[in-house]
Image: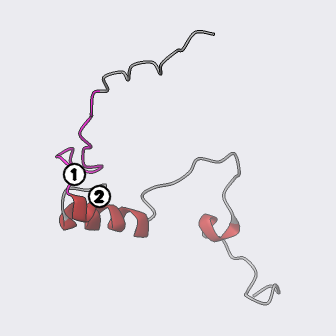
């Protein structure tokens, strides 16, 4: 039986992470952002619904601005 040693490890290039907002190097305290400012910009985009997942569904009554049913499900 032949003794096979483990294969040599490959050299891996370490890629420095970049800020998701401005592209600067990431700071460990604010990962994946470079600063508190970029983290707040991203939070603002989430709160203003700037990020959306595309769907095949049409607009709902709430988004269309038309008169819909009240919270009890009855007409207004």
What secondary structure predominates along the stretch shown in magenta? Answer: loop
Provide the residue designation for mark 2.
31
Provide the residue designation for mark 1.
26
Give coordinates of residue 34: x percent, y percent.
Answer: 20, 56
Dividing the picture into quadrants, the one containing residue 72 is bottom right
Give coordinates of residue 68: x percent, y percent.
Answer: 72, 76
Give coordinates of residue 16: x percent, y percent.
Answer: 23, 39
- SS label for mark 1: loop
Q: Nearer the viewer, residue 14 or 71?
A: 14
Give the left or right position of residue 20, taking residue 66 as reference. left
Q: Residues within 10 Å of mark 1 (few under 14, many from 20)?
A: some
Q: Residues within 10 Å of mark 2 (few under 14, many from 20)?
A: some
Whether the residues at callouts 2 and 1 have beta carbons within 8 Å, the answer is yes
Q: Residue at x 39, y 19 (%)?
A: 8
Residue 23 within the magenta-colored segment of the rendering: yes
Residue 15 within the magenta-colored segment of the rendering: yes
Give coordinates of residue 14: x percent, y percent.
Answer: 27, 33
Question: Gap between marks 2 and 1, in whole Å?
Answer: 6 Å
Give the left or right position of residue 10, taking residue 33 as reference. right
What is the magenta range? 13-27
Mark carried by residue 2:
none
Q: How many marks?
A: 2
Q: Which part of the image, by quadrant, shows the N terminus?
A: top right
Q: Residue at x 38, y 23 (%)?
A: 9
Q: Nearer the viewer, residue 61 or 29?
A: 29
């Amino acid at each position: 039986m032949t003794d096979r040693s483990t294969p040599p490890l490959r050299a891996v290039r370490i890629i420095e992470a970049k800020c998701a907002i401005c592209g600067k190097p990431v700071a460990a305290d604010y990962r994946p952002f470079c600063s508190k400012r970029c983290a707040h910009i991203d939070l603002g985009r989430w709160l203003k619904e700037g990020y959306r997942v595309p769907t095949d569904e049409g607009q709902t009554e709430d988004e269309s601005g038309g008169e819909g049913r009240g919270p009890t499900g009855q007409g207004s």
